[in-house]
Image (cartoon, rainbow, N blue to C red):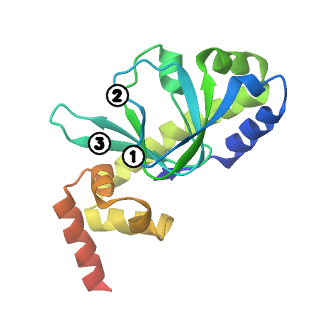
Amino acid sequence: MIRINYEFLDLIENLRENPEYQSLITAHNFKSGHVILDQNSKVNNVYMVKEGLTKCYLTEDTGKDFIQEFFGPGEIFGELEIFSETYSFCAIETVSQVSLYKITHKGFVELLKKHKEFNWLMLKSLASKVKYKAIRHSFNQSHNTETNLMRLKSEHENIYSLIPKKDLANYLGVTERNLNRAINRLKESV
């Protein structure tokens, strides 16, 4: 649910200390609720979360948001659009105060070409995103809301304080009303 990649984050922080790469990677801070990338916009940079939490979502033609992922420390975004040379298909918005690293398009390509460890961790990150998404969608479609909530709570004990209910409902693909009912049923069963 909350994607984290400390191995990749450690590499980026080490690269920032190297004079050869310092100018390619810049640090930025955002308050909760800030949209870093808009859906269907041109992507000129790749970003990595240093601290905090962001949500990756797309707004359907019905106006409903569907949350793909929550990105925590070490998670990268914007890379798919750079690779595919397309506009962003999702929006990225901060859920909490967020510190992140920004790598320009040119800097990202340079790191891929020159730095083997960066390239390897990028490939691992992409593979992990594909694998996780398949497992998540399969599980969510095969189980009811209560079971999905119990799984999320087992992964993140304080899930209800980390993520607003509206976002949690959008992540699970249910209404807020359905989510509240499921939470109440789980409370009653304890």
Q: Earlier in the sequence, mark 3 or mark 1?
A: 1
Q: Which mark is residue 165?
A: none
Three-letter amino acid code of the residue under disc 3: Phe
Closer to viewer: mark 2 or mark 3: 2
In the rendered view, tell whether residue 110 sits above or below residue 95.
above
What secondary structure is found at the residue carrying circle 1?
loop
Percent coordinates x, y for residue 60 in the rendering: 22, 34
Using the image as rendered, state which of residue 159 and residue 23 is in the foreground.
23
Q: Which mark is residue 66?
A: 3
**At x 67% / y 19%, what residue is drawn?**
107
What secondary structure is found at the residue carrying circle 2?
loop
In the rendered view, tell whether residue 16 sits above or below residue 144.
above
Residue 7 left/right relative to 79: right
Percent coordinates x, y for residue 31 in the rendering: 47, 47
Distance from label 2 to label 3 (Cα)? 12 Å
At label 3, counting other C-alpha atoms closer than 10 Å, the crowd grade (few under 14, some 14-19, many 20 or more) is some
**At x 53% / y 18%, what residue is drawn?**
83
In the rendered view, tell whether residue 119 sits above or below residue 32.
above
Q: Earlier in the sequence, mark 2 or mark 3?
A: 2
**At x 23% / y 77%, what residue is drawn?**
185
Using the image as rendered, state which of residue 47 and residue 80 is in the foreground.
47
Q: Earlier in the sequence, mark 1 or mark 2?
A: 1
Q: Which mark is residue 33?
A: 1
* Residue annotated with mark 2: 39
